[in-house]
Image: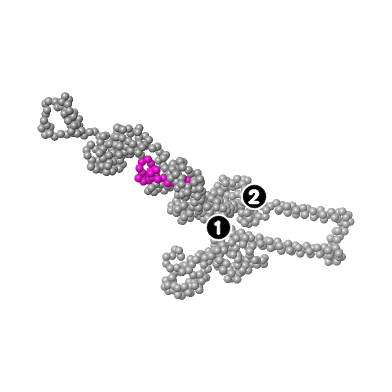
Amino acid sequence: MGHLQSDTIVISTIEEAKTVPLGEKVGILAQTTQILADFLRIVDEVKSRVPDLAVHNTICNATIDRQREAARLAEKVDLMLVIGGRNSANTKKLAAIAKDKGAATYIVENSEGIQNVEMTKDMVVGITAGASTPDWIIEEVMEKMKDFNEQEEKNLMEADCGNCQETSAETETETETAPEESAAETGEETVEINQEAEAQAAAGSEEQTALPVAEEEPEENMADSYAAFDRDFKDIRRGQRVKGTVIKVSDSDLMVDIGGKSEGVIPRGELTPAEAENIAEYFKVGDEFEVIVLRRENEDGHPVLSKKRVDVDLAWEKLAKAMEEGEILSGKVIDIVKGGLLVDVGLKGFVPASLVEMGFARDLKGYKDKEIQFKVLECDKGHNKLILSRKAFLEEDKARKYEAAWEQIAEGQVLHGTVQRITNFGAFIDLNGVDGLLHVSQMAWYRVNHPSEVLRIGEDIDVYVLNVDRENEKISLSLKQLIPNPWTMVAERYPVGSIHEAKVVRTASFGAFVQLEPGVEGLVHISQLSHSRVGKTEDAVNPGDIVNVKVLSFDLENKKISLSMKEAMAPPAIEYEEEFISEAPVREEPMHHQESDDAPVTIGDMMAEQGNTFGTEEDV
């Protein structure tokens, strides 16, 4: 239904098919485990009501065969065992078919379920299984049924033996009380025995009693020996888990002593893939581990064992315990599949994409062959369902680091962190589980327009802890506190009168700010931009220009430097018009200063007196 875009209706019986509203064009599909007869009856009913019908028989062929065979078998037996999951639609339908045929029907999920089945030795029992039921479970149930038969036979034999002993006791008593009658009834054969007995009696009473004792004693001793011999060996049953010891390693299998009458064999296929690839590398004589008995004997008389299946059982047990206790486990990502990751944990566990990271992970390619940690969310051996969560581990790990970090952090510390997030006003730094804010004003001694000019996400940096607010869980950080303040060297590097190259960083109506070095900026007043008058700062300089400036003064306390561009320039050349020069009166006699007739007055003095400072007398 999830894949169909058109209107869909689900029905399960022919009665529903008779009443459900239908259109002129109808298509019919079936669940793969539907009973074929029911499907065909519903098709016939719909066909009688719809002119245009498309039928697709989507029932699995294996399912049809099993259902047909289950029906045939149920007619011949007193009791039917259906092996499979109780919630499986396939198993339920097989059980329904068997029950309709009149057989007492039970669903058993494994060999242990037989304990709840009411059956007797004289019953004829049929066994069927769902298509998805593993073969080894079916074999376990079959073996359990054989054990049931053997036990019943043993009980009958014990009962028969008891009857025989009672009869022998009665016969012996009668013989002792009525020897003549017994002899008469035994006939000729008895006479011969009596004659032999008389001959033995003639030889003496000691010989008569010694002979039977000498013959019987070895039989009793031999029986005791066989009994002791049998007791030394384990009773090996199919499906049993036993401990074994490796006694031989070959390229194709392992020979293992499990305490039985003969050694067991573990074929290559019953080892894990890694073990099977190089048996000699993983095993050596003397290794001990648990195995499960698959068959009591093979064609050579050795029990067939499996280590892989025990490993699977142990893995399920370990994972179930880990889920119950909230344990953190690790495993290798073996494949990237639609919707998540497959992880090898002795079994194949599934990590949904939504549980791979703290947020939704859109690209999972980087996780292939990577070792990851996780928690078990769901562990259902019966339905072979194992759901893992890396996100749960990350959340728990973050909470643990968070608590530990808050306990240790303090003002004045220098900590190592990772840039997690960048905003317009600063960057958030991960300090081993705790986030601190590095404000843009604390990133450098110079003006930073945006944090991305200094930092990038994922970068590792050292930061200084300015303030810790535990109540509001806020941490203020600084980067510039770890960098020497360039203003402490200004007096040495930029003495008054020195000329330096600088970069124009911004302009204002009153002048331009230039950078002598990162963190050290000075002001060139508009009056100091040029020898000529400047009406607008941008007429002289623009941000990014490289200029020469002369240090006029500095105020270290307030971090201010006064600079001049025109003082760093060569004085401009003065040009005069020829007309002005030719018409200028020439004084033959020396000129005198107004205040003293005795002092000679030069042209430079006159120019200075009139306020003209554009040149010297020599220039003129």
Q: Is residue 495 left or right of residue 143?
A: left
Q: Position of residue 540 (x, y in %)?
A: 25, 40
Q: Pointer 1: what residue?
A: 380
Secondary structure beneath label 2:
strand
Q: Is residue 535 left or right of residue 169?
A: left
Please name the amino acid that badge 2 sits on: Asp
Classify the position of the C terminus by image quarter: top left
Q: Pointer 2: what residue?
A: 257
Query: In the rendered structure, which segment of residues is drawn in magenta?
Result: 431-458
Along the line of sight, the residue nearer the viewer: 457 or 381: 457
Q: Is residue 319 left or right of residue 178?
A: left
Disc 2 to disc 1, how far (Cα)? 33 Å
Residue drawn at point x = 54 percent, y = 62 percent: 131
Residue drawn at point x = 66 percent, y = 66 percent: 120
Q: Position of residue 524 (x, y in %)?
A: 28, 39
Along the line of sight, the residue nearer the viewer: 15 or 432: 432
Compared with 85, 255 (above or below) is above
